[in-house]
Amino acid sequence: MQSLSTRASPGILTMPMDHAELTTEQVLKRDIPWETYMTTKLITGTGLQLLRRYDNRSESHRAALLDDDGPAYVRVFISILRDIFKEETIEYVLSLIDDMLTANSKRARLFHDKSLANEDTYEPFLRLLWKGNSFIQEKSCKILLMIVSARPKNQEGTANGEASNSKKQLSTIDDVLKGLVEWLCAQLKKPSHPSHAVPMAINCLATLLKEPMVRSSFVQADGVKLLIPLISPASTQQSIQLLYETCLCVWLLSFYEPAIEYLATSRTLPRLTEVVKGSTKEKVVRVVVLILRNLLSKGTFGAQMVDLGLPQLVQCLKAQAWSDEDLLEALNQLEDGLKDNIKKLSSFDKYKQEVLLGQLDWSPMHKDPIFWRDNITYFEENDFQILRVLVTILDTSSDQRALAVACFDLSQFIQFHPAGRIIVTDLKAKERVMKLMNHDNAEVTKNALLCIQRLFLGSKYASFLQA
């Protein structure tokens, strides 16, 4: 199938940017020459009759027509969007459809009626996303989203879920969702309208990302990174809504592992923290807290949250008078989870993270005999990975505190592991430590000497000398 994002449609010209300021009401005041289109065989006689009965009529009159013969009107609208390329007419028909669906969103189901099995009810809207002006793009996106959302749950491939006997190939739902995600990402990268495009794209994604397949397409399109800059404290009502819907997108992505992997390597967590610190909007605080609750148990997020002061922030949030019971429950769950993480972070996981990041400091665990006695066997994991990193730090670090702590930790391993002296010697640590015995910093020299003493003299005698 030809790429949905590149299908060409002759005759549609992009209008000036202020076209997006048009309203549905303004467009529907136009007089469209339907008879001329029938004369040129761009619409059928039946289509003309249906349009005459429908066009310029009251909402109640139109509602009755749609109740009686809704799929027939959908067929006429789709055929016009497919066969007529005059921009004013396309805008008009899109406004008719938008008006129809806005009055009753359940009418989106009409596009999936069995009588339309051979009609590609998605393709015209998806094509117009790329070929229309800002008004056309916005209407097409809104309508397409409603149609996609209203599709039957068991829809498998074709435009309306029925197998087609037609020789023409219909859009599959996978094609449609991928094409829609591609266009939404393009809008976030290069908006077609300075104020409308990004909020519209985020609004659509906040609905679409409920679907696992869309999450996959969005991550594959590298869309997650496009959301991160939008996570920032907001002031105006419009920016608050954009922030809320952006965070809603992140919350939906927090259920999808490949997206979590990207969130872990970005500045998502510090940005979310700043948002929740500065926001008074309950719905914004709620969705951010729900994101944090989801991420807490993933990877190193728990440790990052503790470092960012989330335990104290949660205490402050709990002290405020929130009316949302879901928010209060999520805060309690987040608080309990952070407490569990703090306990874990005083154990080997915290120590391992400290070493692997090369950020060694005199945290209590280094000099805690219980920590070394309880966790000494964990140092054997991955062929003594942590010890190897400590030795590398001795070779490469210019941080005097890190050098001193690394020497001390090697001496602790020698003291508490039955084969500590042999293992540390085999890792060629002795030569590196001896070089540090002449270091300019007294703290480094002291701990390098202790390590060498334990290597040569044994832990008990070395401890005696140290005392």
Image (cartoon, grey):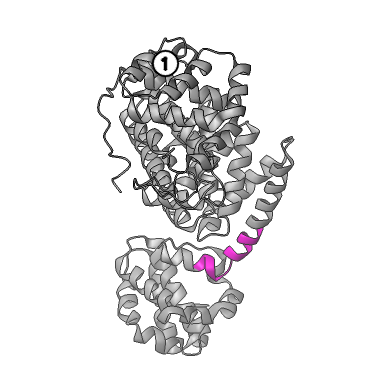
* Residue 227 placement, left or right of 131: right
Is most of the magenta stretch helix, strand or loop? helix
Label 1: state its secondary structure.
helix
- Please say if 5 is above or below 241: below
Q: Nearer the viewer, residue 245 or 439?
A: 245
Quarter of the rendering containing residue 150: top right
Q: Residues within 10 Å of mark 1 (few under 14, many from 20)?
A: few
Expressed as whole percent of the image width and height from the top left, the position of residue 319 reads: 72, 39
- Give coordinates of residue 200: x percent, y percent: 46, 30
**Residue 350 x %, y %:** 53, 65
According to the picture, the residue beneath numbered tag 1 turns out to be: 21
Residue 278 shows in this picture? yes
User: Is residue 383 in the magenta section?
Assistant: no
Given residues 311 and 203, the one toward you in this image is 203
Front residue of this view, candidates 68 and 135: 68
Q: Please identify the quarter of the rendering in which residue 371 is found.
A: bottom right
Residue under the point 54% across and 57% down: 303
Tell whether position 346 is magenta: yes
Q: Does the image show residue 246? A: no
Query: Which amino acid lies under the numbered mark 1 shown in the image of this protein?
Result: Glu
Q: Which residues are magenta?
A: 339-351
Residue 428: where, in percent of width, then height?
32, 82
The tally of labels here is 1
Identify the residue at image location x=62%, y=31%: 281
Vertical order, 1 against 235 (above or below): below
